[in-house]
Image (cartoon, helix red, strand yellow):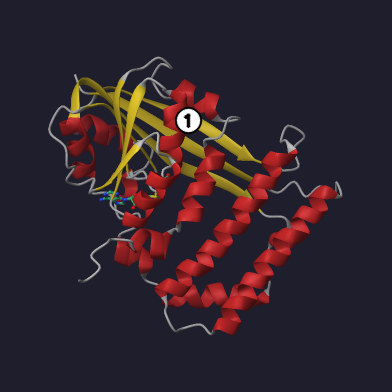
Amino acid sequence: MPDCRNTAWSDRVQGIDTLYYSRKLRFSEPFGPRFREAIPLTPDETGVLLEVGCGPGALSERLHVWYPGMRIVGIDRDDAFIAFAKEKAPEAEFLVGDAERLPFDARTFDVTLSHTVSEHVETAAFFGEQYRVLKPGGRCVVLSSRKSIVVKAPCLQPDETERAFWKEVGERDTSFQDVGVCKYPLNEAQLPLAMEKYGFKSVSVRYVTVDLTPDDPATPDDFAAAIFAEGRKSELDAVASAERSLPGVFTEERLSAVRRRILEKYSERESLYRAGIRQWDTLVTVIMVMSGEKK
Ligand SMILES: C[S@@+](CC[C@H](N)C(=O)[O-])C[C@H]1O[C@@H](n2cnc3c(N)ncnc32)[C@H](O)[C@@H]1O
């Protein structure tokens, strides 16, 4: 039997670890209140919420905590993400499916919500399908990561081995085009205009900032450790994606050298942190939270 599972995104674009652990940080408690304030739902909300393009399920997990009265359903076309999410977050329901042809009857959901998905799905289908499956009075919430400030500590900068590896990957890897990553980009004005165009009323936009700065005194030690762990996992995951996207291109020796360097530099960063030698490296992300109603 041929394997007809679709794992193109998790194999070649962003691995499970990258999406799961970066979102665990983004939606963790220090930032939860900021999102809850921007999302027009109340803590005692009931009904059914569909997370479109849920990936490995980190946001669905949080949505269950933020809105305990709601039934949370996540859908994604990547089989590996859905298998992982089912295992990790049994409190929500997950299924494989296409956002451009949602496998649900019209007027099924009270809320549809997505995070960093709109730019990858054809715009008319993205909004049209959510409009169709929402009940009258239902809300569509779109979270979209807009701008980032990224400042790496000197010890986390790529060395010559990594730079040469990533240069070659950049020259050869066509995964983003093949998988259709960011094929439908819309700016901060085009997104709400599109939401209105496809029928939603009372459209509103808020912005939430998430700042990950391990050396800031407001960042607890265990949170700083989680930031370093996430950075290390994402970089290792990116090497694995490159290996899967370009089979046979890199020798095991070369891949091991890049992995070793990643482990060494994060271990150095953690040592500096433990010694109290501040680097003030930071990752700040501005996330747009847009919502509209199906009247
Ligand atoms: C940038 S990732 C975001 C995943 C998740 N929302 C998160 O923030 O971790 C984009 C996701 O959209 C999914 N996706 C892209 N096009 C899709 C489509 N047509 N139908 C369903 N899922 C899709 C991908 O599989 C991937 O999981």
Horizontal relation, residue 109 to residue 238: left or right? left
User: Looking at the rendering, which quadrant does residue 123 occupy?
Assistant: top left
User: In percent of the image, x 33 and y 63: which residue is there?
Assistant: 8
Q: Which residue is mark 1?
A: 207
Question: In this view of the protein, can residue 213 be seen by the observer?
Answer: no
Q: How many marks?
A: 1
Horizontal relation, residue 48 to residue 273: left or right? left
Classify mark 1 as within 8 Å of ligand 1 or not, answering yes or no: no
User: In percent of the image, x 32 and y 44: which residue is there?
Assistant: 118
The correct choice, above or below, for 201 with respect to 172 in the image is: above
User: Looking at the rendering, which quadrant does residue 130 occupy?
Assistant: top left
Q: Nearer the viewer, residue 279 or 190?
A: 279
The correct choice, above or below, for 139 with respect to 248 in the image is: above
- Residue 9 at x, y percent in the picture: 36, 59
Q: Nearer the viewer, residue 23 or 222?
A: 222
Q: Secondary structure at mark 1?
A: strand
The correct choice, above or below, for 236 with respect to 209 in the image is: below
- Residue 239 at x, y percent in the picture: 53, 69
User: In percent of the image, x 85 and y 46: which residue is there?
Assistant: 276
Question: In this view of the protein, can residue 107 be seen by the observer?
Answer: yes
User: In percent of the image, x 78 and y 50: which residue is there?
Assistant: 279
Looking at the rendered image, the quarter that the N terminus falls into is bottom left
Q: Nearer the viewer, residue 214 or 163?
A: 214
The correct choice, above or below, for 227 with respect to 197 in the image is: below
Looking at the rendered image, the quarter that the C terminus falls into is top left
- Residue 143 at x, y percent in the picture: 40, 36
- Residue 260 at x, y percent in the picture: 67, 72
What amino acid type should be assigned to the residue bearing mark 1?
Tyr
Instruction: Give the class, few, some or many, for how many residues have Cα within 10 Å of label 1's Cα (few <14, many ≥20).
Output: some
